[in-house]
Image: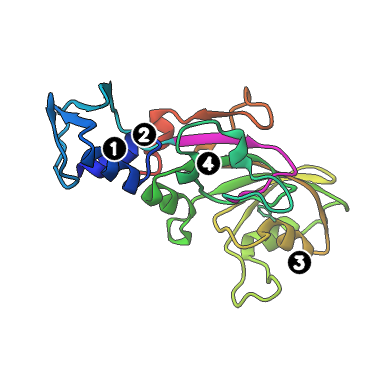
């Protein structure tokens, strides 16, 4: 990795600040001052900034229990971004792999690994997401079959892909879908004459929301969880 990039990855410095610290001779690699930004740092190299050892931050993989009234965006809009709840270095480099509506709660995956999040959200990968759904009206008899066959959403050319509905009670169900169209779950129930009153994502692929996490809390994914999308 280039030395200026290595400095940025291990500090809060911008690229131009990193170059400035190089120019002023503040960086040593294996004991010797290096001023060349393009110098290639190898894994075993020891890099110091004013005698402080630098270690680049690796890729991060996080699960969060999203609370209601937060948005899945990198900036605050009418409501605060859920990234405000994550106090880690360089949090602006994180992004959300599969957004939820502001009023939806539950499992959100957050990372700075673009290829990994692509594997989570790309329609071609058919990753299954499971939602707990509370409804305004009782679930009518043939909804399970309709969802299995696909329903027509407003302004969409094709039917939804086959989805699995597990009915829990008169107005409560678990729905598993392999797409992520805008407001998909709410629109699917609207297409069969019902209305979602509460929505909570439980699962993405084989990653289940950790029961220990209260709304607003997060933890790093385990290696096994991360490997599912590599
Ligand atoms: N489907 C919705 O309608 N909303 C969400 O937040 C997620 C899936």
Query: Looking at the picture, does residue 218 appear above or below residue 228?
Result: above
Nearer the N terminus, badge 2 or badge 3?
2
Q: Which residue is mark 2?
A: 11
Q: Which residue is mark 3?
A: 191
Closer to viewer: mark 2 or mark 4:
2
Q: Are marks 3 and 1 in contact (CB under 8 Å)?
A: no
Give left or right: position of 71 versus 103: left
Nearer the N terminus, badge 3 or badge 1?
1
- Residue range (magenta): 61-73
Q: How far apart, in angstroms, are the residues tagged by discs 2 and 3?
A: 50 Å
Mark 2: secondary structure: loop
Which quadrant is the C terminus positioned in?
A: top left
Q: Which residue is mark 1?
A: 7
Q: Are marks 2 and 3 in contact (CB under 8 Å)?
A: no
Nearer the N terminus, badge 4 or badge 3?
4
Closer to viewer: mark 2 or mark 3:
2
Mark 3: secondary structure: helix
Looking at the picture, how far across and down is residue 94, in whole percent? 48, 44
Mark 4: secondary structure: strand
Q: Residues within 10 Å of mark 1 (few under 14, many from 20)?
A: many
Give left or right: position of 44 versus 8: left
Residue at the image position 24 percent from the left and 31 percent from the top: 26
Q: In this rendered view, identify the residue nearer to me: 146 or 225.
A: 225
Nearer the N terminus, badge 2 or badge 4?
2
Q: Residues within 10 Å of mark 4 (few under 14, many from 20)?
A: many
Residue at the image position 28 percent from the left and 27 percent from the top: 54
């Amino acid at each position: 990795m280039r030395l200026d990039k290595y400095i940025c990855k291990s500090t809060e410095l911008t690229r131009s600040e990193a170059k400035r610290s190089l120019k002023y001779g503040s960086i040593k690699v294996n004991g010797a001052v290096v001023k060349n930004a393009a110098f290639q740092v190898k894994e075993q190299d020891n890099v110091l900034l004013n005698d402080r050892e630098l270690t680049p931050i690796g890729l991060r993989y996080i699960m969060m229990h999203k609370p209601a009234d937060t948005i899945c965006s990198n900036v605050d809009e009418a409501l605060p971004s859920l990234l405000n709840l994550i106090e880690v270095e360089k949090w602006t480099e994180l992004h959300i792999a599969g957004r939820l509506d502001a009023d939806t709660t539950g499992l959100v995956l957050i990372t700075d690994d673009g290829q990994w999040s692509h594997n989570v959200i790309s329609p071609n990968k058919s990753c299954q997401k499971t939602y707990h759904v509370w409804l305004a009206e009782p679930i009518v008899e043939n909804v399970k079959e309709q969802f299995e066959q696909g329903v027509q959403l407003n302004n969409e050319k094709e039917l939804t892909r086959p989805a699995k509905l597990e009915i829990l009670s008169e107005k409560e169900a678990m729905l598993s879908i392999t797409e992520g169209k805008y407001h998909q779950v709410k629109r699917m129930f609207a297409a069969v004459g019902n209305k979602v009153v509460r929505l909570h994502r439980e699962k993405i692929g084989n990653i289940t929301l950790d029961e220990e996490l209260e709304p607003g809390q997060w933890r790093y994914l385990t290696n096994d969880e991360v490997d599912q999308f590599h």
